[in-house]
Image (spheres, grey):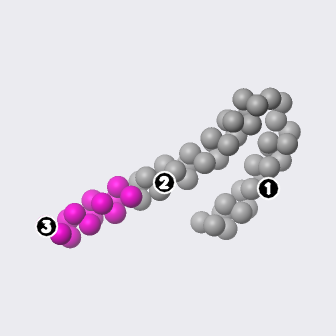
């Protein structure tokens, strides 16, 4: 996952550099981090679900 983040930094940095205004830059940052946060959330929910089943 760290490799993906490092690979994604170059296009994100270029988009931020070429951004027409601050709103576009904010959208680029949110659009790049929200999928990662979403996947981490799903992984956490699955972990909790399977961990509870093991305890029962």
Query: Relative to 42, is 52 on the left or the right?
Result: left
Residue 7's place in the image compared with 22, above or below, is below
Point out residue 53 in the picture as x, y percentages from the top left corner.
20, 65
**Image location of residue 6, percent across then percent down:** 71, 63
Helix, strand or loop under label 2: helix
**Secondary structure beneath label 1:** helix
Residue at screen point 69% across, 36% down: 26
Q: Which residue is mark 2?
A: 39
Q: Earlier in the sequence, mark 1 or mark 2?
A: 1
Residue that lies at the very extreme toward the right in this rendered image: 18
Q: Main secondary structure of the magenta part?
A: helix
Q: CA distance from mark 1 to mark 2?
A: 22 Å
Tags 1 and 3 touching, CB below 8 Å? no
Disc ID at residue 50 = none
Toward the bottom, the furthest residue is 54
Classify residue 19 as left or right of residue 49.
right
In the image, the segment drawn in magenta is 44-56
41 left or right of 54 in image: right
Q: Dot 3, how many residues are within 10 Å of its Cα: few (below 14), some (14-19), or many (20+)?
A: few
Instruction: Name the residue at 56% across, 45% down.
Output: 34
Report the residue that reaches farthest toward the front.
22
Residue bearing mark 3:
56
User: Are the two marked residues, 2 and 3, in contact with CB atoms closer than 8 angstroms?
Assistant: no
Question: Alpha-carbon distance for marks 2 and 3?
Answer: 26 Å
- The answer to whether residue 46 is magenta is yes
Label 2 vs 3, first from the N-terminus:
2
Give left or right: position of 23 versus 53: right
Q: Per the image, is 47 magenta?
A: yes
**Percent x, y of residue 8:** 72, 56
> Earlier along the polypeptide chain: callout 1 or callout 3?
1
Residue, x 83% and y 47% (percent of image)? 14
Residue receiving disc 1: 10
């Amino acid at each position: 996952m760290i490799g993906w983040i490092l690979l994604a930094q170059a296009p994100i940095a270029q988009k931020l550099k070429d951004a027409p205004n601050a709103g576009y830059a904010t959208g680029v940052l949110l659009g790049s981090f929200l999928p990662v946060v979403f996947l981490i959330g799903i992984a956490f929910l699955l972990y909790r679900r399977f961990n509870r089943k093991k305890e029962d």
